Image: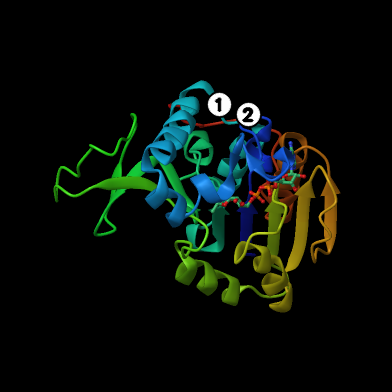
Amino acid sequence: MRIFVLTGAGISAESGIPTFRDAGGLWEGHAVEDVATPEGFARDPDLVYRFYDERRRNLKKVEPNPAHRALARLERAMPPEDFLLVTQNIDNLHDRAGSRRVLHMHGRLDAARNERGEVLPWSGDLRAADRCPRTGTRLRPHVVWFGEIPLHLDEIGRFLASLRPGDLFCAIGTSGVVWPAAGFAAEAGRMGARTVEINREPTGGPFDEVRRGPAGIETPRFVEDCLALLGRGSNAPEDGCPPSRP
Ligand code: OAD
């Protein structure tokens, strides 16, 4: 059995990171076009650097929740080639919960990118004056903005295309309005996989099964059901999780 899990802002909500669309079209008080587009960055780079600096600093104050940890447990129970975790989130809570392979399709806050597109880890503030130690060129947040192409689409497409009847697709805490991620459930369904949604609110997405409720409760339940299907059912607590590190 193969399992594809797609996560969105809702999985990190119980860790204290606000979601996008619950804020009435604003992203923590900013218009999306000011802080999440290449045009916004060209217009006012300092605003954009400060915006992501705040979010990067906030990573040190938040912790993974039971939903992140449950997905790390599921990954450990499966052959690596049969499990794929894709997140739209730029936080690092999946990684800190112990997930070993997470595709951050919208980039990540704890990295910066130089003008050649090379990515380097970045944990402190990032400013216009900062230069890439390798190339001496300007750095920007390693975040995919509106109008830019998301990352890892080839690998995601290959996994989706490999799904068959008996496989599972699960979308957790995503409103399903941002493409191409919004199309993954329908694609998985076309390949014959059973599609499951975990969300606090109805989204109207193309799912065979909807588990309505907080991700922190419903994800561990979903993972237990998967482990039972795999013949690996366990009520063990968060065994073997590495300690969380911001
Ligand atoms: P949204 O803010 O659009 O949606 C969050 C979803 O999580 C909503 O459907 C909520 O109902 C649900 N939700 C909130 N709290 C929850 C909880 N505790 N348990 C379960 N569900 C909960 O966030 P995304 O779908 O992730 O893109 O947004 C997609 C993309 O839009 C983001 O990656 C970002 C944004 O613009 C970029 O930055 C490129």
Residue 25 percent location from the top left of the image: 69, 46
**Residue ID for mark 2:** 15
Vertically, is 59 above or below 187? above
Residue 63's label in the rendered image is 1
Dot 2 falls on a residue whose secondary structure is loop
Residue 109 percent location from the top left of the image: 43, 40
Say few, some or many: other residues with alpha carbon within 10 Å of mark 2 (under 14 / 14 to 19 / 20 or more).
some
Looking at the image, which residue is at 69% across and 42% down? 10
Q: Is residue 43 visible?
A: yes
Dot 1 falls on a residue whose secondary structure is loop
Name which quarter of the figure residue 115 lies in: bottom left
Instruction: Judge from the rendering whether residue 244 lies leftward or rightward of residue 30; answer left or right.
Output: left
Q: Are marks 2 and 1 in contact (CB under 8 Å)?
A: yes
Check the image and tell me how it is coloured: rainbow
Name the one closer to the observer, 7 or 101: 7
Residue 14 percent location from the top left of the image: 68, 30
Q: Amino acid at mark 1?
A: Glu
Name the one closer to the observer, 58 or 72: 58
